[in-house]
Amino acid sequence: MTDKVVLITGTSTGIGFDTAVATAQSGFTTVATMRDLAKAQPLRETGSGVDIRELDVTDPASVEACLRGVLADYGRLDAVVNNAGAAAFGTAETLTMADIRQAMEVNYFGVVEVTKQALPHLRAVGGRVVTVTSVGGAIGQPFNDAYCAAKFAVEGFMQSLAPVAATVGVGVSVIEPGAVATAFVANADVDPAQAIADAGPYASALSRYLERTLTSYTEAQTGAEVGTVVLQALTAEPPVFRWQTSDWARTFVGTSLADLDGSGVLGLTGAWVRPPRE
């Protein structure tokens, strides 16, 4: 892989961090990008030899400048891993429209911007677009209205793009992790007690949801385990479109893919917020 160049977004922590290390160790020339280079030191300290650069996926000029620099220094771009993202915790009445728009800006429009600008370079070499979505891109989850909406949008975008991109030699894949033990959850900056206090008529449902969700993170995957699946998606021949990162994620996503009338999914997620039966 020594002549293959991969650019990864959102690498300061979590899945992006571990994916950058995994691709570098496997022989990819790895360009690890992040919005704030002040957070780059932990990645430098891995000794993985990654090339760390600034990139804000919500700023088209930043994307263009980063890609221009990569092409100038390496002469090619073989793959993009869209990983940058942000949590958006709340439901329709408790989120502001600014919250919802920001979630779409980072989680959806940022992915579209990077992909759109990278495609001409990927076409030149028969490259790959690999995008980290979520099981929340297949199953909408309570109190994640904006986040799941963005992830659904990403999956629709990529599934529509995939057959067209294949005609010009570019493979497109999505990665669907479940709960992952990374800083992503901490970065959501949710104070459970305050969130419940602010939830108004949804307080009891939110309390039950948080109890269930916080428990699930005690058995979460590591970012490194997800990074291994991203690496598989980058190298699989022929490309595979949809990748789950655990048996649990496969079962969970499979519920949605087989659920023609939606009752299976709503029965599942409704149990997360309903009072238990007497």
Image (spheres, rainbow, N blue to C red):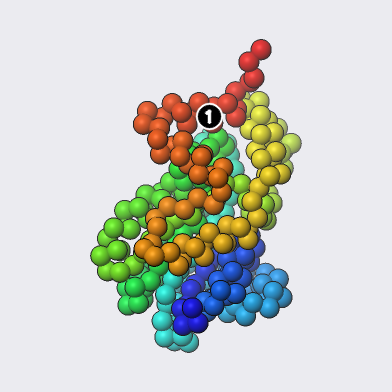
Foreground of the two, 192 or 167: 167
The quarter of the rendered structure image containing the C terminus is: top right
Q: Is residue 229 left or right of residue 160?
A: right
- 264 vs 113: above or below: above
Residue at the right extreme, as displayed: 193
125 is higher (above) or lower (below) than 145: below
Residue at coordinates 54% horizontally, 77% vertically from top-left? Answer: 27
Q: Quadrant of residue 26?
A: bottom right
Q: Quadrant of residue 128?
A: bottom left
Residue name at image x 46 percent, y 83 percent: 3
The answer to whether residue 58 is seen in the rendering is: no
Q: Is residue 257 left or right of residue 55?
A: left
- The answer to whether residue 152 of the structure is visible from this angle is yes
**Amino acid at dot 1:** Leu
In depth, the one of 75 and 102 nearer the eye is 75
Q: Residue at x 46, y 62 (%)?
A: 233
Q: Which residue is mark 1?
A: 268
Measured from the top left, where is residue 248 in percent x and y? 56, 42
Residue at the extreme top of the image, as rendered: 278
Residue at 70 percent across and 38 percent down: it is 215
Looking at the rendered structure, the secondary structure element under dot 1 is: helix
How far from the left and from the top, in percent, is residue 163? Answer: 29, 58
